[in-house]
Amino acid sequence: MTLPYRTLDRDWDVIVAGGGTAGAMAAIAAARTGARVLTIEAQGSLGGTGTNAWVTPLMRNVSAGENLNRGLTDELKRRLEARGDGATDPGGNDNWFNPEGMKFVLEHMLLEAGGEVLYHTHVVQPVLDGDRIDALVVHNKGGLQALRAAAFIDATGDADVAALCGVPMRGGDDDGVHQAMSLRFTLAGVDTARLCAFLRAQGQWQESEHFLHFWMVWDKRSTLEPLFRRAVDSAVLLERDGDYFQGFSVPGRPGEVSFNCPRIRPDLHDGADPWQLSAAQVDGREAIDRLTAFCRTSLPGCETAFIGVVAPMVGVRESRRITGEYTLTLEDILDCAHFDDGICRNHYPVDIHSVKGGERLLHDREGSAPYFARDAYHEIPLRCIVPVGVANLLVPGRAASSTFEAQSSIRVQQNCHTMGEAAGITAAWAAQRHGGRVRAIDAQALRTEMRVRGGVL
């Protein structure tokens, strides 16, 4: 069926579908490479997981104590800190940030580089010419329009464009079960000094009230577990509300705490299913009410706290994963595999948030495999973001070609930044020199360029 769309009378070198964690960096990198870039974003701001899903702070990704994600990630952190929306704690962790501030910083970076953005716009279908994408049909207040480019980057997180192109997909574990989703929220009006003192007394050491981090998971020896058990017994919480609970302070937002929870109920785990995604939003808000009541009654300093933010996006850890020119495996991670076309170094642990019975949270940092050495890392090859069967498309971020276990390690935001930066440079060069054909780019030249821009490769 042919959709009744109109084709715009202009085109771009690179179109980025999705201005989220990988997409914003891809668009900035492509624009700085001299490409004419358009970013298509369904929400009203850039940043995706880090902004609209409120996933803060960034998870550390270090080897021998040094950050592995540099380049644009370093610049983002510097700009956040300069405006009071980022911070470095006394231990040297520079990953604390305010999601609302990040929206402004990413937009400034893109527009300064000469890129364009089209908000509140959804991809409907690609227009294919053989193995090439000629245009993307999108929908917004202007109706259906076809936007043309030489090269395309699918940074939707769920590989929407690649799936519509017929790229083979994987999803979930061997049983098709995905990682747990979350709906993050904040409590404002918190007396963080009192909360900090209470947590210290409970044996959860805090650096200061400005850098809070506290947690509870059933049967993981958290000192907060008795509080959760009493709340379940008194019907303030459900049993599953204690499956995962974690709170962080937020730079630039005094008196506010961000929560990496609630977990969405186990039968809702597929972020690419619109019905499950909608139900997850409802389930998450119901759980937020319960957790707010718990915090007010059980955590000193939270007695008069109120809901500050509920993330407009459900936090999706894993949905579709493309079949790429190379599929990263758990063995690659544990054996510290290096590749001639490596574009990103990673030392984040295999971190599976399972919805199955018997918690499967493999966050081990000790073992006999090479990966557990303090100075270890593996690489993510460029081929993991090159989907099979399409000549002018790249898919950086959590949908990159990987097994279920490997994806749980590489999915964190800073790795998505670096994959996005590599994709942006690659797509710009492909559009400028090779008619959009991404496989024509020399990986060694790309690695050299990323080092010039501050990358660690």
Image (cartoon, grey):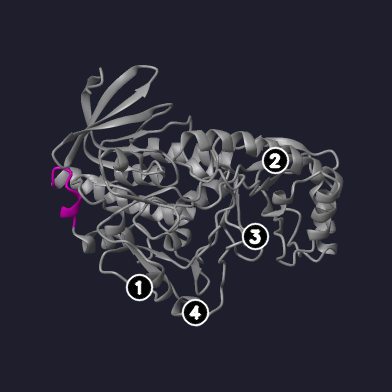
Helix, strand, or loop for circle 1? Answer: loop
First in sequence: mark 4 vs mark 3: 3
Q: Disc 4 vs disc 3: Cβ atoms closer than 8 Å?
A: no
Helix, strand, or loop for circle 2? Answer: helix
Look at label 2 and name its amino acid: Ala
Q: How many marks?
A: 4
**Which residue does the image show at 66% across and 36% down from the upper left?**
285
Q: Separation of disc 3 and disc 2 at Cα?
A: 31 Å
Mark seen at residue 373: 4
Residue annotated with mark 2: 287
Q: Position of residue 130 (x, y in %)?
A: 13, 39
Asked if residue 255 shows in the view, the reply is no
Give the quarter of the image for residue 141.
top left
Q: Disc 4 vs disc 1: Cβ atoms closer than 8 Å?
A: no
Nearest-to-viewer mark from 2 and 4: 2
Span highlighted in magenta in the image:
434-441
Q: Separation of disc 4 and disc 1 at Cα?
A: 14 Å
Asked if residue 43 shows in the view, the reply is yes
Q: Position of residue 403 (x, y in %)?
A: 39, 60
